[in-house]
Amino acid sequence: MPQIILLMLLLSSCSMTSKMALEFRDVQFFEIHETKSVPDMSLKISGLAFHSSLAVEKTEVIKEGDTATVFVYLTPTKKGLSGNFALEFPVPSNIDKVMFGPDKHLIWKRGVGPIKE
């Protein structure tokens, strides 16, 4: 019996340490705004992770080729954290598209602006 409890604790701790990235379909109150700056423009994005038992731990923007992807990482809810996120980041001239999350949902395209679906 103690071995089963130990195994359950080990498995649950392993699952808690892996990064869980928020998918666009699980975002409420999503907002995106362009901010003109020199030499590049910036994007401000914000929203709420629609998971009652999870909170936002950190955000990250990864650039690959002409695309930037925004990741919002979640963690089990704990004191001092909430489900809200907000970030502003520069969009250099070599970036043509900005995607959101592991599902790579298109949220901005150069020449078009914010994509609101």
Image (cartoon, helix red, strand yellow):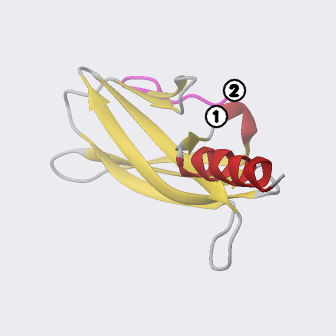
Image coordinates for residue 80, horizontal then vertical, percent: 63, 79
Question: Depth check: 100 or 1 in front?
Answer: 1
- Image side of residue 69 versus residue 13, left or right: left
Residue at the disc numbered 1: 23
Q: Secondary structure at mark 1?
A: loop
Q: Say whether residue 48 is magenta.
A: no
**Cα–Cα gap, marks 2 and 1:** 14 Å
Image coordinates for residue 88, horizontal then vertical, percent: 40, 56
Toward the left, the furthest residue is 39
Residue drawn at the location 65% of the way across and 34% of the way down: 24
Residue 66 sits above or below residue 8 on the image: above
The image quarter in which residue 109 lies: top left
Between disc 2 and disc 1, whose residue precedes? Answer: 1
Extent of the magenta region: 109-117
Q: Which mark is residue 117?
A: 2
Q: What is the three-letter code of the residue carrying label 2? A: Glu
Image coordinates for residue 16, horizontal then vertical, percent: 62, 51
